Image (spheres, helix red, strand yellow):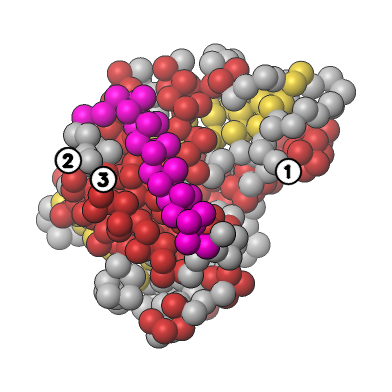
């Protein structure tokens, strides 16, 4: 039986790689729906090639034999789906993820913002509905693969490549151009996540993501810098054994793991892994002075409630402003910190309160640029 899958965010970095995986495993999958954002030309090509039943696009598109949907909800509510890959970037992932969970559809989750914004609600709903949330994020996918009995795990160890400014000075970072920031040494990803990797906010968001996915206290989630990106993350058991998941840095592997779980099939790999070719693996403690975003994320995570919604919204809007040339790279942190400092915490928010906090924070952040820079 072929697994029925939909992809929300099929034109992005994860989405296109997921389609490469599916193409390789054609006899294992049937595509129900593809949804994309502004890149309607690519979405049209994908729909023509993969012939899903449905397509959803931000702007109307016409593909022979493929029905166009009015909203993402129509994908999330379609019980034909066995699994939905949520691979869009930013806050748009949350609503369809919740809808799919309510409909008992398993989720392959690449959109970490969903858990950062509303992790308590999402995980509670998933439990109530017996829905599996399989992480696509390489670190969480690694942890997922390492865990046999979660009650015996004492610590999660999340690796960070360190991004393009790892061994650069604080001054270099302060003056970084958009181009320098988007040059990630190990991973080829979308723009928003690449900026987050440069500031290490991506790691901050991943700590929060790990807290929700695996139910660990923040004090039991550690970050270590590992520039080669070979060890994708590790866990420590109560007896002191450490299990790590290791492999060449390719997103095809975690994507395939998430959408085929619990099965494994031969995948897209250019070559077999060789320890001797890797030769060395380095590890170091993160420089929290240079990358204060990590501590900020721990702080928000420990505050709980809407604090992580707040930093997610502030960071995302600040990243967009940086990409638009309105602010400097380090101001992303300053803005996010200011928003958290001013945030009036709601400890147990409803989903509407989460969306309202998200909206207010974004409005405040974008308002700052209008006054100061336009
Ligand atoms: Mg990651």
Depicted 285 relative to depicted 126: above or below: below
Region in magenta: 348-373
Look at the numbered disc 2 and give the secondary structure of its residue: helix
Quadrant the C terminus occupies: bottom right
What's the CA distance linking mark 1 and mark 3? 35 Å
58 or 47, nearer to the observer:
58
Front disc: 2 or 1? 1
What's the CA distance linking mark 2 and mark 1? 44 Å
53 or 268, nearer to the observer:
53
In the rendered image, residue 54, in percent from the top left (x then y), is placed at: 71, 22
What's the CA distance linking mark 3 and mark 2? 34 Å
Give the residue pinned by disc 2.
151
Quadrant the N terminus occupies: top right
Specify whether tag 1 is near ligand 1 (CB below 8 Å). Answer: no
| Mark drawn on residue 343 | 3
In the rendered image, residue 141, in percent from the top left (x then y), is placed at: 41, 48
């Amino acid at each position: 039986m072929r697994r029925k899958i939909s992809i929300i965010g099929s034109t992005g970095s994860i989405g296109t790689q997921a389609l490469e995986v599916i193409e390789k495993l054609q006899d294992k999958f049937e595509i129900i729906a593809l949804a994309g954002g502004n890149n309607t030309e690519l979405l049209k090509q994908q729909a023509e090639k993969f012939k899903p039943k449905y397509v959803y696009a931000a702007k109307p598109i016409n593909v022979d034999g493929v029905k166009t949907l009015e909203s993402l909800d129509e994908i999330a509510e379609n019980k034909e789906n066995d699994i939905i890959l949520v691979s869009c970037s930013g806050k748009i992932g949350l609503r369809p993820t919740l809808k799919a969970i309510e409909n008992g559809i398993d989720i392959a989750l690449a959109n970490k913002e969903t858990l950062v914004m509303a992790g308590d609600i999402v995980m509670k709903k998933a439990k109530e509905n017996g829905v599996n949330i399989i992480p696509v994020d390489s670190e969480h996918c690694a942890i997922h693969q390492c865990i046999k009995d979660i009650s015996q795990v004492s610590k999660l160890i999340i690796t960070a490549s360190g991004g393009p400014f790892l061994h650069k000075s604080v001054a270099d970072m302060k003056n970084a151009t958009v181009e320098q920031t988007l040059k990630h040494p190990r991973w080829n990803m979308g723009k928003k996540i690449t900026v987050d990797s440069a500031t290490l906010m991506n790691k901050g968001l991943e700590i929060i993501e790990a807290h929700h996915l695996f139910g660990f206290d923040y004090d039991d989630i550690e970050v270590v810098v590992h520039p080669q990106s070979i060890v994708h993350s590790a866990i420590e058991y109560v007896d002191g054994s450490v299990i790590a998941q290791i492999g060449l840095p390719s997103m095809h592997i975690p994507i395939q793991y998430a959408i085929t779980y619990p099965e494994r099939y031969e995948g897209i790999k250019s070559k077999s892994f060789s320890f001797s070719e890797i030769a060395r693996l380095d590890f170091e403690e993160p420089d929290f002075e240079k990358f204060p975003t990590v501590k900020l994320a721990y702080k928000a995570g420990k505050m709980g409630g809407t604090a992580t919604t707040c930093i997610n919204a502030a960071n995302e809007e600040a990243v967009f402003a940086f990409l638009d040339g309105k602010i400097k790279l380090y101001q992303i942190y300053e803005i996010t910190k200011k928003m958290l400092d001013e945030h009036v915490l709601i400890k147990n928010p409803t989903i509407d309160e989460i969306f309202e906090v998200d909206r207010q924070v974004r409005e405040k952040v974008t308002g700052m640029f209008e006054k100061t820079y336009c």
